[in-house]
């Protein structure tokens, strides 16, 4: 404990330097704006600004503080377009659309934005505290996860999807299957055989996540707006001066705590990230709290759970990167590259050899979380006023953001056609009352599942028993089974008790 306090004292001495403090604030503000743009997200924001930070000759601690500020600022910012436009800023914000956007459509945009900011602050701060206290121990446990354990984790995540979103379990699983199918498009990494490319060279490398999320969410939302406009059903969305209430925070307090714990521990597992954390947190909370079946219609707990989880996961992903030199997510992989550019080797010795970098970064995250809350809460009303833009102007705005964002990042005109095609497909699914979140999660988890399954079978020489050879895998399979069976058993038990009560009444 004394070592931790000494390290934090060193870190705050670095982070509170006026220049570094300015970089924290600038990074948080820039990250919020980047996260709010559909399709950009933290990984692209950090990647775009890394050369600038290096080229300006910043010291390693200053550069890392700026880039980390952009990282968790973008995690905050992703909620803005998710809640207001139903277009996720990144993968971790997909679950936020489920209850955040219905709140905005009901005239509670300010309340939703404020609650998500507070849940994000608590989740992020919780993660930084745990990172300060237990980073080396937690990182050592995280790297004991073998490819077979990751397969079990993915099975658990897919099992969670069964009752995650939507009114129909069958449609939810079909949506996840569509996502899995999209994830298999491209050249097979093991055999070099093209899969489902239909002779199109532009998709030999597979379909980028940004294309899928912007197409299925952004363009599908655009087509829905156009449809309503043509049919005369387009109505102005109500906007009031609503703000988060103490009753909301009281209702969500245990939700935020549970989601923060789930998000942090999933975040420290290399390769998982905020998308898995927010999905598992939302699914867990739905099973625990959704007794009135209000999740998906604008329940404050359904908004708070993924927001707390994805920010906690962002902090958790820093743990293996700092203590072991193993990136926990795509964004921390770029941060790892930044450290190596400055000739700093991440790992346990970094805390001894370069404490100003390691502890300065951790201390800046404490400051950054507070800064984000201070920056975001006063802007809630301004963000909410975006909904007063007439929707016949909002339609081309979404199109411009989608096309410019994709072309700037990917740079392939074919991808503009692809997001249009996916938008039509997403619009069609919405007409059939499919939720699009399982499609996105199936796409994200599908690659992780396939890659780790192949690694596990390669290690065992094709022996499938490796998938149940470790206690962690067995525990996860049992949990997956319980996730599927428990709701069915509880539903039958409730019907039986209701029938017994009726017979007694007669």
Image: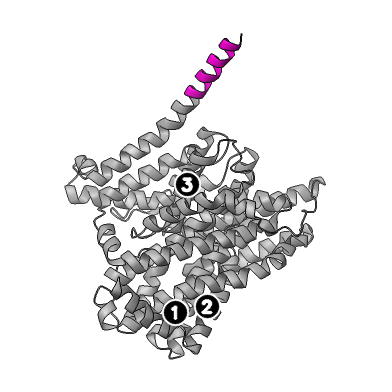
Which residue, given by chain and number where applicable, does mark 2 sit on?
Answer: 27
When asked about the image quadrant of residue 37, the answer is bottom right
Residue drawn at the location 41% of the way across and 42% of the way down: 158
Nearer to us in this view, 433 or 195: 433
Badge 1 vs badge 2, beta-carbon distance below 8 Å: yes
Q: Residue 188 vs residue 289: left or right?
A: left
Out of 432 and 380, give the one closest to the viewer: 380
Does 495 appear in magenta?
Answer: yes
Front of the two marks 2 and 3: 2
Highlighted range, magenta: 492-506
Q: In the displayed image of the protein, which residue is found farthest to the front?
A: 2
Q: Position of residue 456 (x, y in %)?
A: 24, 49
- Disc 2 crowd rating (10 Å Cα; few below 14, some 14-19, many 20+) is many
Location of mark 1 (residue): 65
Q: Residue furthest top?
A: 506
Nearest to N terminus: mark 3 or mark 1: 1
In terms of image quadrants, where is residue 503? top right
Nearest the viewer among 365 and 460 is 365
Could you tell me which quadrant the C terminus lies in?
A: top right
Q: Is residue 218 visible?
A: yes
- Mark 3 secondary-structure assignment: helix
Q: Which of the two discs, 1 and 2, labels the residue nearer the N terminus? A: 2
Looking at the picture, tell me which residue is in the foreground, 225 or 403: 225
Prevailing secondary structure class for the magenta stretch in the rendered image: helix
The reply, left or right, for residue 138 in relation to residue 243 is left
User: Is label 3 in contact with label 1 (beta carbons under 8 Å)?
Assistant: no
In the image, residue 411 sits, relative to residue 201, either above or below, namely below
Regarding mark 2 in the picture, which secondary structure is present there?
helix
Residue pointed to by mark 3: 179
Q: Which mark is residue 400?
A: none
């Amino acid at each position: 404990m004394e070592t931790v306090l000494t390290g934090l004292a060193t870190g705050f001495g670095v982070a509170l330097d006026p220049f570094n403090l300015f970089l924290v604030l600038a990074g948080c503000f820039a990250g919020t704006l980047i996260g709010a743009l559909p399709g950009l997200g933290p990984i692209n924001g950090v990647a775009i600004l890394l050369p600038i930070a290096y080229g300006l000759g910043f010291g390693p601690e200053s550069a890392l503080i700026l880039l980390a500020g952009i990282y968790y600022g973008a995690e905050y910012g992703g909620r803005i377009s998710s809640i207001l436009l139903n277009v996720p800023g990144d993968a971790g914000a997909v679950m936020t659309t489920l209850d955040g956007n219905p709140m905005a459509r009901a005239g509670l945009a300010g309340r939703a934005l404020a609650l998500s900011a507070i849940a994000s602050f608590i989740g992020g701060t919780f993660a930084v505290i745990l990172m300060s206290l237990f980073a080396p121990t937690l990182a050592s446990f995280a790297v004991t996860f073998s490819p077979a354990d990751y397969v079990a984790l993915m099975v658990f995540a897919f099992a969670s999807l069964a009752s995650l979103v939507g009114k129909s379990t069958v449609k939810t699983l079909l949506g996840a299957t569509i996502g899995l199918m999209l994830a298999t498009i491209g050249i097979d990494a093991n055999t070099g055989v093209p899969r489902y490319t239909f002779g199109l060279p532009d998709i030999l490398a597979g379909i980028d996540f940004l294309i899928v999320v912007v197409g299925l969410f952004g363009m599908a939302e655009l087509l829905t707006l156009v449809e309503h406009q043509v049919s005369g059903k387009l109505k102005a969305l109500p906007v009031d001066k609503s703000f988060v209430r103490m009753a909301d925070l009281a209702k969500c307090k245990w939700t935020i705590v549970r989601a923060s714990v789930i998000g942090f521990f999933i975040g420290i597992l290399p390769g998982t990230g905020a998308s898995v954390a927010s999905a598992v947190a939302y699914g867990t909370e739905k099973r625990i709290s959704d007794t009135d079946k209000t999740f998906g219609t604008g329940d404050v707990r359904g908004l708070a759970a993924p927001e707390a989880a994805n920010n906690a996961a962002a902090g958790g992903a820093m743990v293996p990167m700092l203590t072991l030199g193993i990136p926990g997510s795509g964004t921390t992989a770029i941060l790892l590259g930044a450290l190596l550019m400055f000739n700093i080797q991440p790992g346990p010795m970094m805390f001894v050899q370069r404490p100003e970098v390691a502890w300065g970064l951790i201390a800046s995250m404490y400051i950054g979380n507070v800064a984000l809350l201070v920056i975001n809460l006063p802007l809630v009303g301004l963000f909410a006023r975006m909904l007063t833009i007439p929707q016949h102007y909002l339609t081309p705005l979404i199109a411009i953001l989608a096309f410019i964002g994709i072309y700037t990042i990917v740079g392939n005109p074919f991808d503009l056609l692809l997001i249009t095609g996916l938008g039509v497909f997403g619009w069609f699914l919405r007409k059939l009352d499919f939720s699009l979140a399982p499609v996105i999660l199936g796409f994200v988890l599908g690659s992780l599942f396939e890659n780790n399954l192949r690694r596990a079978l390669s290690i065992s020489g094709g022996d499938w028993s490796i998938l149940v050879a470790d206690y962690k895998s067995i525990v996860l399979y049992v949990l997956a089974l319980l996730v599927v069976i428990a709701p069915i058993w509880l539903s039958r038990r409730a019907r039986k008790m209701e029938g017994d009560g009726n017979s007694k009444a007669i």
